[in-house]
Image: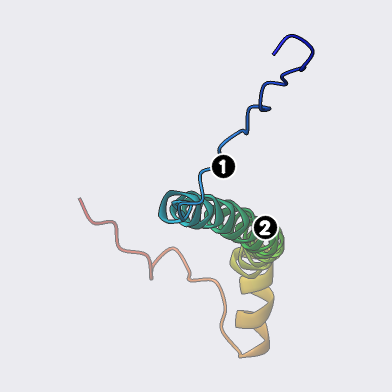
Amino acid sequence: MAGTITHSAPKVVRFDLRRPRLVPVFLMIGVLSLVCLFFVWSRIELTHLEYDLSRLNSELRSTRQEVKKLRIEAASLRHPKRIERLAAKQGLRMPTSSQVILVK
């Protein structure tokens, strides 16, 4: 067959038609989702804690101011001149030297 031209058959690429393994893909998506959810939850929790800290700092400041006012008020109430005025209004007077008894 001198004049015949022979063509070789083209190679056919064989496709693998097996079912792809989806379990590792879904498992990876699940783990990634859990990590993302944990990150978001931790940021939200941090924000709540910052608000609580700010509120507590504000309460601490106001409580310290109230304590300062109460200390000033207590000091003014214990002042000897004030006590003498109140005693005089109620008819009390300073003791005489014969009324004072020294205890040793």
Q: Earlier in the sequence, mark 2 or mark 1?
A: 1
Vertically, is 84 above or below 27? below
Around disc 1, counting alpha carbons within 10 Å, would you say few (fewer than 14), some (14 to 19), or many (20 or more)? few
At a point 63% along the width and 27% down the height, the residue shown is 11
Q: Quadrant of residue 52?
A: bottom right
Q: Secondary structure at mark 2?
A: helix
* Residue 61 rendering spot, x and y as whole percentages: 70, 57
Residue closest to the far front: 1
Q: Amino acid at mark 2?
A: Thr
Quadrant where the N terminus lies? Answer: top right
At a point 67% along the width and 57% down the height, the residue shown is 47
* Residue 99 rendering spot, x and y as whole percentages: 38, 71
**Residue 15 numbered mark, or none:** 1
Depth check, front residue: 76 or 58: 58
Q: Is 11 left or right of 100, judged from the image as shown?
A: right
* Residue 46 rendering spot, x and y as whole percentages: 61, 54
Q: Which residue is mark 2?
A: 47
Q: Is 56 left or right of 6, judged from the image as shown?
A: left
Alpha-carbon distance for marks 2 and 1?
53 Å
Residue closest to the far left: 104
Depth check, front residue: 21 or 56: 21
Q: Amino acid at mark 1?
A: Phe
Depth check, front residue: 61 or 18: 18
Vertically, is 37 above or below 70? above
